[in-house]
Image (tube, rainbow, N blue to C red):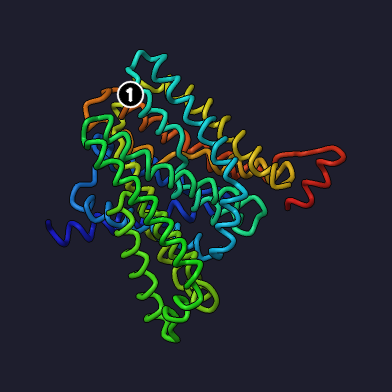
């Protein structure tokens, strides 16, 4: 790898991100869709493919999603998370039913086999933790009443993926039933143990991690998040869940200072994450499946909206907060791509990968746009006006 070429490519990409971020800020708009389109232009088959720096960008993208979820975890204590998970377990069930079923139905209607339909169900079910986390941060919704409900749904989805991924491995013949069962037990057990440690020993871990040196604190927390994320991935749990639990475990002075120190790093690597996602898409493969992708995206945008509306509503949220919960859950992303990749590797259905790519790009763009418009959407009349005032 040529170091000068690598540096030039990375510099051009980062400067391009800077221009997009400034333009988005002036327009009062999220830069996420712009990042995705630029990644599409720089990917294989795009206008100006990035070759030398792609491996580096891939690693940066992994770090980006880890930092996004770490920062979200810093906003909540372990007690708050477990209480929220208990309260929102019914929301997780509703989310699964409403959003897994459309993918399965679409696969069967397309004439695919049952296994391919199950893969497509996974694609439509799980929201993008990375995009949702970025939207919550950018739109200033971290402290909103509906946000704990949204985060609980994301964590439930990621935990569901810890069982789903080994299961489809069995269905495609990649693992025997015993191996897959052990993998599922190990994944769920690892999450429960980590969550227990975060709740039981959180204050002690926070005191241990805290340092009066900003450099020492930053290196400690980033290093810990990467190690836990890597171990989580090793156990077939989402690295994002591991990073989120690290954030949950930290509190007090350590969490307060970490939020300040990590924000610039999060912004840089999160942008790289969305660029890398766009790099994985081939523009020429999208047109033949675009019609189906649009129809599926519209249906599952509505089902995610219904999920958020119902879930936030059962916690007493007003109508605007319920709309925010629904729109912020719309984007699909990293897990959907992983599921489609497994299907391609197993030779399940050749149209699944481009359909997933088009579907994800539509919802990764539609979600941020819709969420941005929610706070300006008129909600009028009597009780709704009082709810609107309260939600703001």
Residue 311 sits in which quadrant? top right
Q: Quadrant of the N terminus?
A: bottom left
* Residue 288 percent across, percent down from the top left: 34, 19
Q: Report which residue position mark 1 lands on.
A: 116
Q: Residue at x 47, y 76 (%)?
A: 206
Residue furthest left in the image: 1
* Residue 37 percent across, percent down from the top left: 39, 40
Q: Residue at x 59, y 51 (%)?
A: 86
Is residue 211 toward the left or the right of residue 85 in the image? left
Residue 270 in sight from this viewpoint: no
Is residue 259 toward the left or the right of residue 118 in the image? right
Q: Is residue 325 above or below residue 350?
A: below
* Closer to the camera in the image, 343 or 7: 343
Q: Is residue 361 above or below residue 209?
A: above
Is residue 89 toward the left or the right of residue 293 in the image? right
Residue 145 in sight from this viewpoint: yes
* Closer to the camera in the image, 359 or 283: 359
Residue 190 sits in which quadrant? bottom left
Q: Is residue 186 above or below residue 330?
A: below
């Amino acid at each position: 790898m040529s170091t000068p070429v690598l540096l030039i490519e990375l510099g051009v990409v980062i400067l391009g991100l800077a221009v997009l971020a400034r333009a988005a800020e002036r327009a009062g708009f999220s830069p996420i869709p712009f990042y995705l389109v630029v990644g599409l232009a720089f990917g294989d088959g795009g206008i100006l493919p990035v070759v030398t720096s792609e491996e580096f960008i891939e690693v940066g993208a992994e770090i980006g999603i880890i930092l996004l979820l770490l920062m979200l975890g810093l906003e909540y204590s372990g007690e708050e998370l477990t209480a929220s998970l208990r309260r929102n377990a019914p929301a997780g069930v509703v989310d699964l039913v409403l959003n897994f079923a459309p993918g399965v139905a679409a696969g069967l209607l397309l004439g695919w086999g049952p296994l391919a339909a199950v893969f497509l169900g996974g694609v439509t079910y799980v929201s993008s933790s990375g995009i949702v986390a970025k939207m919550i941060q950018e739109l200033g919704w971290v402290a909103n009443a509906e946000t704990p409900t949204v985060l609980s749904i994301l964590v439930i989805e990621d935990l569901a993926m810890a069982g789903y991924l080994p299961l489809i491995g069995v269905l495609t013949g990649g693992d025997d039933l015993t191996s897959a069962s052990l993998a599922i037990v190990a994944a769920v057990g690892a999450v429960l143990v980590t969550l227990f440690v975060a709740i039981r020993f959180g204050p002690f871990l926070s005191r241990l991690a805290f340092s009066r040196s900003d450099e020492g604190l930053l290196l400690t927390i980033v290093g810990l998040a990467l190690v836990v994320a890597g171990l989580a991935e090793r156990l077939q749990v989402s690295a994002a869940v591991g990073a989120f639990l690290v954030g949950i475990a930290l509190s007090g002075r350590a969490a307060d200072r970490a939020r300040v120190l990590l924000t610039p790093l999060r912004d840089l690597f999160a942008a790289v994450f969305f660029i890398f996602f766009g790099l994985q898409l081939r523009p020429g493969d999208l047109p033949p499946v675009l019609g189906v992708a649009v129809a599926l995206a519209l249906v599952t945008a509505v089902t995610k909206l219904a999920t958020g509306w119902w879930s936030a509503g059962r916690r007493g949220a007003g109508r605007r907060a319920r709309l925010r919960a629904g729109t912020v859950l719309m984007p699909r992303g990293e897990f959907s791509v992983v599921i489609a990749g497994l299907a391609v590797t197993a030779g399940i259905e050749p149209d699944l990968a481009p359909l997933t790519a088009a579907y994800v790009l539509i919802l990764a763009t539609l979600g941020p746009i819709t969420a941005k418009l929610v706070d300006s959407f008129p909600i009028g009349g009597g009780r709704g006006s009082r709810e609107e005032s309260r939600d703001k």
